[in-house]
Amino acid sequence: MRNLRAALRAMGVAACLVAAAATAHAQTTEPWRVHYRAALDAHTRRDYRLFRDELLKVREVLGGNSGLSYNLACAEVLLGHKQAALDYLREYTACGLMTNVLADSDFTSIKDEPDFQRLALRLKANGRTAAPSTLVHTFGDVGALIEDVSHDARTDTWYASSVRRGIVFAFDTSGVEKRMAVAPDGWAAFAVSVDSTRRLLWVSVAALPTADGYVDADSGRTALVCWDLAAGKVRKRLETRRTGDRRLLGDMCLTADGTVYVTDSFRGTLYRASPQSESLQVVVGDGVIRGPQTPALAADGKRLYVADGGSGISIVDLATGGVRPMRCKPGVCLEGIDGMVRDGSILYAVQNGTRPERVVRLQLNAKGDEVTAWTLYEQGGAGLGDPTHGVIVDGGFVFVSNSGWDRLGKDEKLKDALSARPAQLRRVPLAAQPARSSGER
């Protein structure tokens, strides 16, 4: 049902890193990916000791990644180490994820153990509903396929992108929506960021069958559009080079100095642009970041956090373009992040590539290179649906819920259903819950 969305975010959790390593782009040279590929090959050959040893090498780099915890549990049980397997499975359970561990044949030898049965029940219970959010806005167009949201503090105006209509909705406290035609040629509108100081609106656009105005001749094309809010027209349009392969500028962030960072969800490229730019500048080349989603500037202004599919979050050195993975403590899940924003030492993230889909708060360490704890904000409930991106406004994290991505067919077109719920903006307060320790079980 979500073959297009699958290209934009992490799919699966338990074996997500194994899958990522198996299909990594040829330009990716990070050693941990090589070890994960070796682990995958070893599991296929039933060399379970090598399977475990290669996973442990990856753990030295990534820390307590949830996919690693699960696969290490598999490795230990296959080696006959029951207690070690249970310990790793407890780490995975503490991440708050769901999986039917009883159906995994790797655990056949301990499936009747009381401790294993209890963990299986807890993994099921991780799907409980947590829905403290409040409604901010309900969109009038049920078939719009809302992707991103931005807020102009200067005018108290909201902007939300519609993939299907190829436009941006603008509305104020009255809730009355106005349509801004910002996607040239009938392309889909994806990421949106408003520059309140310079009165600019940045929108990433792409030619996809999902958009109403799509034509085959434009297939694979994508661009970053700068909209002049005062003049009410496009100021510039920066298109990626045409290489014959499929490209999609999907997610972006805007910094205080007016710089925009935007990711190519299909090719893994990171670009930079400014109001003065006449072209997109490559910061990280094709394929280095496996599945880039929303970027967020680090507190030091020298690094960029990029949500990165199976490996969780990549850290980009903006001076050199170097990329390394964010570490995390055991019991923390960084996979499956789509929307992400930073506030001080906190990352607020929308995880729609996990089961269950959810909104979480991630606590960074003092250096900003490791996630030490997490807080569950929202999951389950009719108000969440398929969430995407969010923004911090007036002491709350406001995110897109019921986006409509779950109604996308294999033909990349939205299925209109009478029972479909409209997309909404929902809000959770920034300090709703105390941080959950990564060591909590």
Image: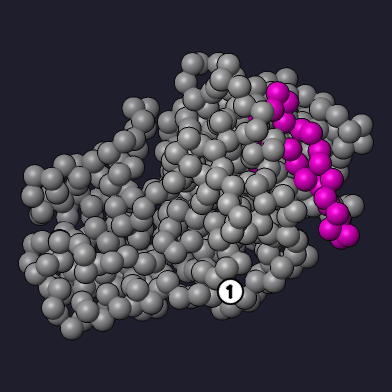
Q: Quadrant of residue 175?
A: bottom right
* 126 left or right of 304 in image: left
Rendering coords of residue 146 (x, y %): 65, 48
- The mark tally for this picture is 1
Kind of residue sitting beneath label 1? Ala
Is 99 above or below relative to 253?
below
Q: Quadrant of residue 398?
A: bottom right
Give the farthest residue toward the bottom. 114
Tell me the crowding category of disc 1: few under 14, some 14 to 19, or many 20 or more residues within 10 angstroms, Cα based. some
* Residue drawn at point x = 43 percent, y = 33 percent: 288
Of residues 66 and 8, the one drawn nearer to the viewer in this rendering: 8
* Residue drawn at point x = 57 percent, y = 26 percent: 282
Of residues 294 and 218, the one drawn nearer to the viewer in this rendering: 218
* 368 left or right of 410 in image: right
Rendering coords of residue 96 (x, y %): 41, 70
Magenta region, residue range: 167-191
* Residue drawn at point x = 34 percent, y = 27 percent: 26
Whether residue 264 is visible:
yes
Rendering coords of residue 41 (x, y %): 16, 42
Of residues 278 and 324, the one drawn nearer to the viewer in this rendering: 278
Is 162 above or below relative to 395?
above
Which residue is the site of mark 1?
A: 131
Residue 109 among magenta residues: no
- Of the 4 image quadrants, the one containing the C terminus is bottom left
Q: Secondary structure at mark 1?
A: loop
Of residues 175 and 28, the one drawn nearer to the viewer in this rendering: 175
Rendering coords of residue 124 (x, y %): 35, 73
